[in-house]
Image (tube, coloured by chain):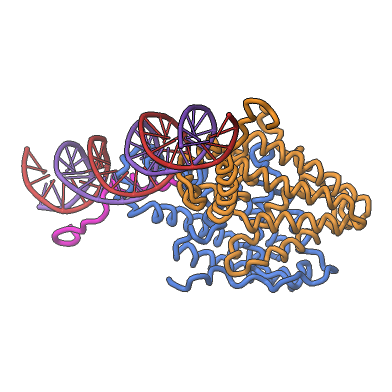
Chain colours: A blue, B orange, C purple, D red
Amino acid sequence: MSERTATPGPRADMVRNRRLLIGAATEAFAECGVDVSMGEIAQRAGVAKGTVFRHFASKEDLLAAITLQLLDQLIGSANRLLEADDATEALREFMTAGVEMLAADRAFCEVVGRPSLQSSEVRKAIARLADVVEVLTARAREQGAIRSDITGTDIVLLLGGIHQTAAPVLDTQPQIWRRYLELAFDGLTTTNARELPHRPPDRLQLTDPLG
Amino acid sequence: MSERTATPGPRADMVRNRRLLIGAATEAFAECGVDVSMGEIAQRAGVAKGTVFRHFASKEDLLAAITLQLLDQLIGSANRLLEADDATEALREFMTAGVEMLAADRAFCEVVGRPSLQSSEVRKAIARLADVVEVLTARAREQGAIRSDITGTDIVLLLGGIHQTAAPVLDTQPQIWRRYLELAFDGLTTTNARELPHRPPDRLQLTDPLG
DNA sequence: ACCTAACCTGACCGGCTGGTCATGTTAGGT
DNA sequence: ACCTAACATGACCAGCCGGTCAGGTTAGGT
């Protein structure tokens, strides 16, 4: 019924394989980093290598899809925290979520830490994240708990730094990033310090203006 | 003259090639990271690929040699700064030297940030560095400018974190790591903050007790 | 001048990678 | 029940990697 000659639509096994693939790729990238092979991902998903390339034209495409999914989660967190009463605590919670995500995902660290691995869509998502965090930071700043010379871009960059501080000992002390998050936060809330040297970072990802 | 039947000794062109090789490898690793190929290094040195393997049995060996050379520079800096009058300023200078070195060398970042890339000799050198920095930190702590719950290992780990904070924008703002160094230092000198969560990191590189 | 051991060279090897494609299978409409 | 387009498959490809080695070259002692 409904329309004549039918709507082709995606086949059932295709959507199933797509779900399996995204799950497997998410896990594999998280555990092994961006250098994990497409063959390994296919194996984890229980499909043949050719199937991976039917769903994603290239490894870059797949990596971008997985990364975008994670960035969207972070952007969602930040947006939700905009509604919180205590803006300073909200900023701390956002940073906790961000560093936690980095600590759990090797490929994510590598992509956000190296612009050369970022597709234009990933760059756009990072810019969107920076925009939301800018508001989050401004609210905490108005509340008087965050020093005046810290921008949202500073906060986003700090996520990678805090994680990297803990990364060399993550194997033996998987929660130690909380220590360095708190240390960084103490730096952010120092109000009697003199202004930081060098101008704040540019708005994120304005490098190579294509896209 | 001198001894009978002569001392074989290294040939002149060999020491020349070795110097060229170390120079080329240092540059190549710094610019391209640990994934630079042995062929590329040979080309930069102006020798054939086989010559590289005559001087260094494997890529790991070469990487370890280059890394050790850099770690020794840092250890030297730290030792020299032990003699300084102002211990707090000495600590800041050491951290400046450390972050500057990381910012200038991609492979060095990757090696110190990922224990799986460290040979046992590199691990030992890092432990030696941590020992010196422990003294440097203790002196600054006694001087009263550094909070009491910060260890030398914290400082060494922070070097990687400070650099990583700036890394995504290093291309466009090559000096911005100074901003984050100062921010971290403000966190270190906050004396009225409550104690940091989680115990300090273990003494560095006690993972897998072989070597 | 000559000799030899030390050294350099670059073709070569197996293994792994991202990516392709002819062939086989199957979902799902009729 | 059957048909076909959509999809899955895995053998296959070229390219690059770390590493090897037989053979040519040369430093440097005599």
Query: In the picture shown, does residue A177 fall above or below A82?
Result: above
Q: Quarter of the image for the N terminus of chain B: give it.
A: top right
- Residue at position x 76%, y 39% in the image: B128
Query: In the picture shown, does residue A80 fall above or below B46?
Result: below
Task: Left or right? Give the position of A201 relative to B43.
Answer: right
Task: Report the front residue among A196 and B98.
Answer: B98
Q: Is residue A3 magenta?
A: yes
- Residue at position x 67%, y 43% in the image: B68
List x then y, in percent, for residue B103: 64, 58
- Residue at position x 92%, y 56% in the image: B85
Q: How many marks?
A: 0
Residue B67 in view: yes
Task: Report the front residue among C9 and B112.
Answer: C9
The magenta segment is A1-26
Task: Left or right? Give the position of D29 relative to B187.
Answer: left
Task: Left or right? Give the position of A5 relative to D25.
Answer: left
Determine the image quadrant of residue B164.
bottom right
Determine the image quadrant of residue A193.
bottom right
- Residue at position x 74%, y 61% in the image: B181
Determine the image quadrant of residue B101.
bottom right
List x then y, in percent, for residue B36: 50, 49
List x then y, in percent, for residue B155: 77, 50
Query: In the picture shown, does residue B114 fall above or below B4?
Result: below
Q: Quarter of the image for the C terminus of chain B: give it.
A: top right
Query: In the picture shown, does residue B207 fall above or below B106?
Result: above
